Image (spheres, grey):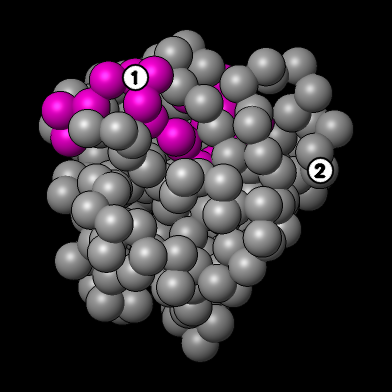
Amino acid sequence: MKKAFLFDLNGTVIDDMEFHAKAWYDILNNDLNANLTWEQVKKEMYGKNDELLVRIFGEGHFSNEKMKELSVEKERRYQKTYLPHLQLIKGLGSFFEKAHQLNIPMAIGSAAIPFNVNFVLDGLHIRKYFSTVVSADDVLISKPHPETFIKCAEQLQAKAEDCIVFEDSPKGVEAALKAGMKAVVIKTYHTIEEFAHLPNVILSVDDYIDPKLEMLFL
């Protein structure tokens, strides 16, 4: 195997991070009275939903059942507002098809719960492109821990050095670095300056029509 492509989902396959932030802001402040600013909410938006709740409220504040309930409710609100805008980032449909035609194996490695992963893969009819999907339910610790991408590579039977990770967040690129993988940054929600400390970034693009991406198929 020459290479494999591993894709984060939210912010990388679809441009939806603003909608996630709004849903979390609503839950955290209006339902849970966390009194966080918009910037504070954005800063905490990485990893699993229960990990986010523990970071903000502390270990043991919520039962596992309550965190699951809050997680699903947050995703319901997100999906309701984002559904009318559900679409691939520009050029990604053609990128997927080209990689598929070249027999480059692809995986989804996301901190999202299956409820959200299925919302995207089935809503956009792109499940056929992915040999494996690793979601929040499949790992003990989410990004920036490397487990998500390590599992993707194992299931694709790909070496870490042959994997290229597509990510929109510094925490996701950090997870790729820890897994020994190169990364392509999609600048949907973060500036390229936020990735300056990460030496595994080989490209940064606004979308998938950028001609620089052609080098990945060589």
The answer to whether the residues at label 2 and label 1 have Cβ atoms under 8 Å apart is no
> Which of disc 1 and disc 2 is earlier in sequence?
1
Q: Relative to 42, say whether 158 is above or below.
A: above
Comparing 101 with 152, the one in front is 101
Q: Position of residue 212 (x, y in %)?
A: 67, 52
Residue at the image position 59 percent from the left and 73 percent from the top: 90
The answer to whether one can see residue 139 in this image is no
Comparing 92 with 145, the one in front is 92
Q: Quadrant of residue 139?
A: top left
Q: Position of residue 186 (x, y in %)?
A: 64, 50
- What residue is pinned by disc 1? 160
Residue at the image position 56 percent from the left and 46 percent from the top: 215
Placement of the N terminus among the 4 image quadrants: top left
- What residue is pinned by disc 2? 191
Q: Relative to 145, say whether 123 is above or below.
A: below
Q: Is 169 within the magenta?
A: yes
Q: Helix or strand or loop: what does disc 2 sit on?
A: loop
Disc 2 versus disc 1: nearer the observer? 1
Q: Quadrant of residue 40?
A: top right
Residue at the image position 24 percent from the left and 39 percent from the top: 134
**Type of the residue with mark 2:** Thr
Comparing 124 with 115, the one in front is 124
**Type of the residue with mark 1:** Ala
Q: Position of residue 112 (x, y in %)?
A: 37, 47
Q: Is residue 119 left or right of residue 43?
A: left
Would you call the spot at circle 2 few (<14 residues within 10 Å), some (14-19), or many (20 or more)? Answer: some
Image: magenta residue range: 156-176
Comparing 82 with 76, the one in front is 82
